[in-house]
Amino acid sequence: MESAYAEPQLLRDLGARGARFAPEIGVEVVVGAETAGVPLAASISLNAQLPFAFVRKPGYRGHEIDEPPVRGADVASRRVLLVDDAVSSGSSVERFAASLTGVGAEVVGVFVLVDMRDVADTVSPVAAALPTDAVSTYLHVLDLATANGLLDPALHRLTVDAIVNRWTDDDPRWDLIPVTADGPLTLPLREVCPFVGANPPMDTATAAG
């Protein structure tokens, strides 16, 4: 998703989308989540003419022990918008929000490129409760990929079915050979659709060892 940041006009437009959301919830500071949320947050900050800061990834080994968790604008006692590339289970949102709360900020909302909570098995209470805006949902991204010829319609149907109906990793349908518009593929579904998140079933003997 970070490739969306490569084009200046696109990054500017994505920032404009977030800038429209910020005043709706009374944001005073835009905060990018290290690392993928930083460019998008900076763009939102410029578009909205709001102060910018970024929050360090909790527990990241490259940080010094005494390094402050938040850099940039002062966030203490201020309403902040947390910006990241995506949200799924919300565990990252929860950790970043805790870091911001720890320095006195009030996290009032989240803005992401892709909201994946609709395909997550579980969503943390924090991520479920915070007002969240996104450019797109994960399922809509798949729809767009199909409409633009990047994803075969047959693969799209199987992928959405796997996501919506929560196929388990040992579901035999993962091993089907999909038939696309160009004919049968040479690989099973689990290998041609790795973005779905399926993993090969674990070998019992390996697991026991």
Image (cartoon, rainbow, N blue to C red):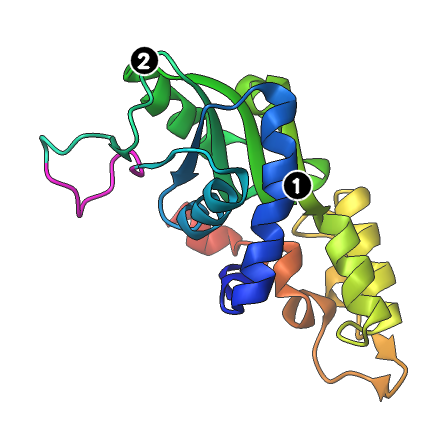
Q: Where residue 151 appears, x then y in whole percent? A: 77, 72
Distance Cα–Cα, label 1 vs label 2: 25 Å
| Residue in view at x 40 percent, y 39 percent | 33
Residue 176, above or below 203: below
Q: Secondary structure at mark 1?
A: strand
Q: Amino acid at mark 1?
A: Ala
Give the amino acid type for the residue marked by disc 2 in the picture: Gly
- Taking the spot 60% from the left edge, 52% from the top edge, the residue there is 14
* Magenta-drawn stretch contains 63: yes
* Label located before the other in sequence (1 or 2): 2
Q: Circle 2: is it few (<14), some (14-19), or many (20+) Cα within 10 Å? A: some
How many numbered callouts? 2
Whether residue 131 appears in this view of the structure is no
Q: Which residues are magenta?
A: 56-64
Position of residue 126 in the picture relative to residue 67 (left or right): right
* Badge number at residue 104: 2
Q: Is residue 162 shown left or right of residue 54?
A: right
Pick whichever, 166 or 17, lies toward us: 17
| Residue 132 can be seen in this image | yes
Give the main secondary structure, helix, strand or loop, of the magenta stretch.
Answer: loop
Q: Which residue is pictured at 76% across the width and 66% down the height?
A: 145
Estimate the x, y position of residue 38 in percent, counting from the top left: 40, 47
